Image (tube, rainbow, N blue to C red):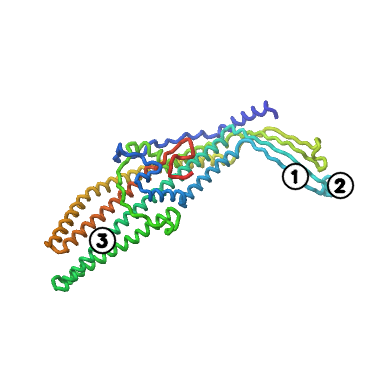
Amino acid sequence: MNRFTVWPLTAAMTLLAGCAIPPRLAHPDMSAAAPLAGVPASTDAAWPGATWWQRYHDEQLNDLEARALQTAPTLAVARARFDLAARSVDVARADGGASVNGSAQVQRERLSENGIIPSKFLGFNWYGQGDLGASFNYDFDFWGAHGAAISAATDRTRAAAAERDAAASMLTAAVADAYFGWQADQARLDIARFLFDNAQKGQRIAAARVKQDIDSPDNLHQADIVVAATREQVVGLEGAVAIRHAALAALIGIAPEQLGDLKIVPLPAAASGLPANAGLDLIARRPDVAASRWRVEAALKDSDVARAAFYPDISVSAMAGLSSIDLGKILSPGSAVFAAGPALHLPIFEGGRLHARFGVSQAALAAAVADYRNTVNDAARDVSTQALTLRQTLDRAQAQSAQLDAAEKLFDTARNRMDRGLIDARPVIVAGANLATLQDTQIQLHSTALAAEIALTRALGGGFHADPTSSKSTSGASSP
């Protein structure tokens, strides 16, 4: 069949099949902004950088983050998923275009004496068959099925890259949160030990006064309760310190003894800030949103692949080789064999399979779009929650600082009066306990504000920024 008969036939068959070809799916409407209306923002607030933890100027934290990004098992899993997705692009590329295959075969066969041509007429029962050849095949991919498959695999690789960066962002936030939690627990432990010593002083005074029949035994029992309660607080915080230490080691992927001793440093100040353009830029700066968006693009390409299956598939194949039943003559010119020609495959009746597969691709696209929209809403809720929590905690800490100032003045006054012999130690003990309790509350508020700031940093993307033209993100939180 020559080209003058192949192409009209192809056109006619394509027209015949075209009546059943579904229309190409339109690109879905994707949200351009996150719903953050009503959440207070600041023009001074900046988006977190790729190494946002360095703003705390803590070399110990910097070292922990670097170790976590190198050895954390959760990040290793995310990297492996990215590598797997990247390999799928190579597979998709290899499936299209031209292919050349070689073959060689030698076999020894015996003819049946009772076959269609009895061996006695041929004069032999055994013969050797040798074949050498190469085949060529090229699929023209007129309808873009292979190209769409490659694009879908590439988009899934981009989604895997964004998921890898999302894992890195969660990891770095978890390390910073655990580290500052450990520092806060150490500061609270010092206060708890002061309260325990303070309670023991009160217990000794109560015991002496009961012994002298100045006070009733109930006062001593009350002092015993305070001592036991403060001792319990010390034990609890000692346990919390050990747990935080173990959690840090687990995040990095090492044993607690490999983490070593951490230096106690003061907690850094927490700052409130939601960038003014958060609603518009959040979608580009959240790795989970970027991953969802790439999955939508991949699902759209998958629908193109399913739709292309309705069209005729045209390919060209050729074969050249040597074939002989006399192995001694296999390399002679007379053993040459050739074949070449076009091939056409047109689905006419598939029992609904093509429409079913296209319907599956439609459903997958709808699910990907729904997941994207849900991810955007979750991102906005996450940012709103953390921004409002941070603002509320900072306001509470500022209001509580007035109580702390008053308690410090009361403690200083009581101690001065005791030094002058105007009062005994009991008012100093009470004032010291009140002051330490307020200091403990202040540390808890400070720690809560830092945790909210870190959570807000993660909610704002943790330094990620989507690059729509590459499978590599610009986040510095993940390793290559």
- Dot 1, how many residues are within 10 Å of its Cα: few (below 14), some (14-19), or many (20+)? few
Q: Amino acid at mark 1?
A: Gln
What residue is rendered at 36% in x and 48% in y? 58
Tally of marks: 3
Q: Image check: 185 left or right of 145? A: left
Name the quadrant of the N terminus.
top right
Mark 1 or mark 3: whose residue is earlier in sequence: 1
Give the CA distance from mark 1 to mark 3. 89 Å
Which picture quadrant has residue 39? Answer: top left
Q: Nearer the viewer, residue 207 or 63?
A: 63
Q: Image check: 134 left or right of 433? A: right
Asked if residue 477 shows in the view, the reply is: yes
Label 2: which residue? 124
Asked which secondary structure carries label 3, the reply is helix
- Dot 3, how many residues are within 10 Å of its Cα: few (below 14), some (14-19), or many (20+)? some
Label 1: which residue? 105
